[in-house]
């Protein structure tokens, strides 16, 4: 049995944020029914296409383990089917632009009327306030949530990160809200609204930067390299390059081969607990007794010199040799891995975090599996559905349409080409 077995999700999501959420719920065992516009589907199906005619990797990698039903929810028959889906499902997940569901005639009031036990979960760009009506994509959320202003180099532009903290990050937040609401429903018997605004999700992930904003009022941020360089701080938290955010200073340092390989680097943390070992390994045993270096506080103004010295050592080793030498000594280091290296990682494949999936239109492709492991609820990654692949099946088996009633819906045009699939 899977953890969320028996939970039915009406998946009205598209693009990235919502689909990452419902994909996780599907991996945990929920029956996720993705509702898509007839003949069109989720816009990502045909975005960033690498194999003409086939669903894109953008779509397939975000929609595993789901069923797809084509439904025009703006026609009378479409509304009828959607109403039945709302009656039947435990959760409705959506990430339409603000107001879209109301315009469709399915605002929260109406949805509650249809099914008071349903949980309605939404991703929006912003929560209530002056921007609540705005459409938002990933990078806007990164900028409005405080990430971009604190990422990158001090004397350069604000920068967005490669990690999709606005979309996938918010999808994760939403999934937690949904399972929490499902748990509360076991006591209250009622559904509720779950809202995960992308700005709020990004800010939550930038919590340490709001911490630093307040620390700034008490003086300079001594672990930031600009402190050691004698550069005064302004009024807001600056961009800190690759400085480690915590009390354990760290930097990205060159390794052997850096001249030709853009990823021949290691992250190196001078954790206080293993400082003596760091001194030994880089050939500076004298630092162990030098009052300029013995305490973390004494080291703070000298971090640039310290890391330059460590780098002289890391440049004589590959990033993997640095790992092999430092890990047995408990010195926290990590190689900068390229996507090419990650794609070939045997351990990640063994744990199912990297999976090969077969798809009828595109053949085998590599995907990221479920990154959270439940010992009693193993994940089986199955391919994403073709557009409308399960329309007839859902109408019959989930909603109980049969005979004339089924024929009426199939012929109405509200469900795409499902007629063919039903025959
Ligand atoms: N049947 C009928 N109509 C449908 C439908 C269906 N099955 N599915 C969608 N539609 C309609 C919607 O009702 C909407 O119509 P309306 O404008 O008349 O209300 C229309 O399709 C477009 O939906 P919308 O959500 O506005 O898509 P968009 O492509 O214009 O905007 C986003 C995309 C992502 C910017 C927007 O959805 C958004 O801001 N979402 C919230 C934040 C978010 O999740 N952003 C990150 C995405 S990764």
Image (cartoon, helix red, strand yellow):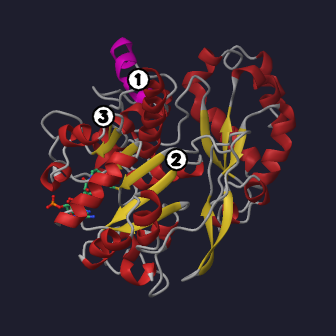
Residues drawn in magenta: 206-219
Q: Earlier in the sequence, mark 1 or mark 3?
A: 3
Q: Nearer the viewer, residue 314 or 395?
A: 395
Q: Earlier in the sequence, mark 1 or mark 2?
A: 2
Image position, residue 240 (x, y; %): 45, 37
Q: Nearer the viewer, residue 234 or 301?
A: 234
Which residue is pictured at 74% across the width and 58% down the height? 256
Q: Quadrant of ligand 1?
A: bottom left
Image position, residue 115 (x, y; %): 30, 39
Using the image, determine if residue 25 lies above or below residue 183: below
- Magenta segment includes 257: no
Q: Provide the major secondary structure of the magenta segment.
A: helix
Q: Which mark is residue 318?
A: none
Structural distance between the alpha carbons of marks 3 and 2: 21 Å
Q: Which residue is mark 3?
A: 116
Structural distance between the alpha carbons of marks 1 and 2: 35 Å
Which residue is pictured at 60% across the width and 29% down the height? 249
Image position, residue 157 (x, y; %): 32, 50
Q: Which mark is residue 212?
A: 1
Which residue is pictured at 50% across the width and 71% down the height? 57
Is residue 158 in sight in this rendering?
no
Marks 3, 2: nearer the viewer = 3
Q: Which residue is mark 2?
A: 25
Q: Quadrant of the N terminus?
A: top right
């Amino acid at each position: 049995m899977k953890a969320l077995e028996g939970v039915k999700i009406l998946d009205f999501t598209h693009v990235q944020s919502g689909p990452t959420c419902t994909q996780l719920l599907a991996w945990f065992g929920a029956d996720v029914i993705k509702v898509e516009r007839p003949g069109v589907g989720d816009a990502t199906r045909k975005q960033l296409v690498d194999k003409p005619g086939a669903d894109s990797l953008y779509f397939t990698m975000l929609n595993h383990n789901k069923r797809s039903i084509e439904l025009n929810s703006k026609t009378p028959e479409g509304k009828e089917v959607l109403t039945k889906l709302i009656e039947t499902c435990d959760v409705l997940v959506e990430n339409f632009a603000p107001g879209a569901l109301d315009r469709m005639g399915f605002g929260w009031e109406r949805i509650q009327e249809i099914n008071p036990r349903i949980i309605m979960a939404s991703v929006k760009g912003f929560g209530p306030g002056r921007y609540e009506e705005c459409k938002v994509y990933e990078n806007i959320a990164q900028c409005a949530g405080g990430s971009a202003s604190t990422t990158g180099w001090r004397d350069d532009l604000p920068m967005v990160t490669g990690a999709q903290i606005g979309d996938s990050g918010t999808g994760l937040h939403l999934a937690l809200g949904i399972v929490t609401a499902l748990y509360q429903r076991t006591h209250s018997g009622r559904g509720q609204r779950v809202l995960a605004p992308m700005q709020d999700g990004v800010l939550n992930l930038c919590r340490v930067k709001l911490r630093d904003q307040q620390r700034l009022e008490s003086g300079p941020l001594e672990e930031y390299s600009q402190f050691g360089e004698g550069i005064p701080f302004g009024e807001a938290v600056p961009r800190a390059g690759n400085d480690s955010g915590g009390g354990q200073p760290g930097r990205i340092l060159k390794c052997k081969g850096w001249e030709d390989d853009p990823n021949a680097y290691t992250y190196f943390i001078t954790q206080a607990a293993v400082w003596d070992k760091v001194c030994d390994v880089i050939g500076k045993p004298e630092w162990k007794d030098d009052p300029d270096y013995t305490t973390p506080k004494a080291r703070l103004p000298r971090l640039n010199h310290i890391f330059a010295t460590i780098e002289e050592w890391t440049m004589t080793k590959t990033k993997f040799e640095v790992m092999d030498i430092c890990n047995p000594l408990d010195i926290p280091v990590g190689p900068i891995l390229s996507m090419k290296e990650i794609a070939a990682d045997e351990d990640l494949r063994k744990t199912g975090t990297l999976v090969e999936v077969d798809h009828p239109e595109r053949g085998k492709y590599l995907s990221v599996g479920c990154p959270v492991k439940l010992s009693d609820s193993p994940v089986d990654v199955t391919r994403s559905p073709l557009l409308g692949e399960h329309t007839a099946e859902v109408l019959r088996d989930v909603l109980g349409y049969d005979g004339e009633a089924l024929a009426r819906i199939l012929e109405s045009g509200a469900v795409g080409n499902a007629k063919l699939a039903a025959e």
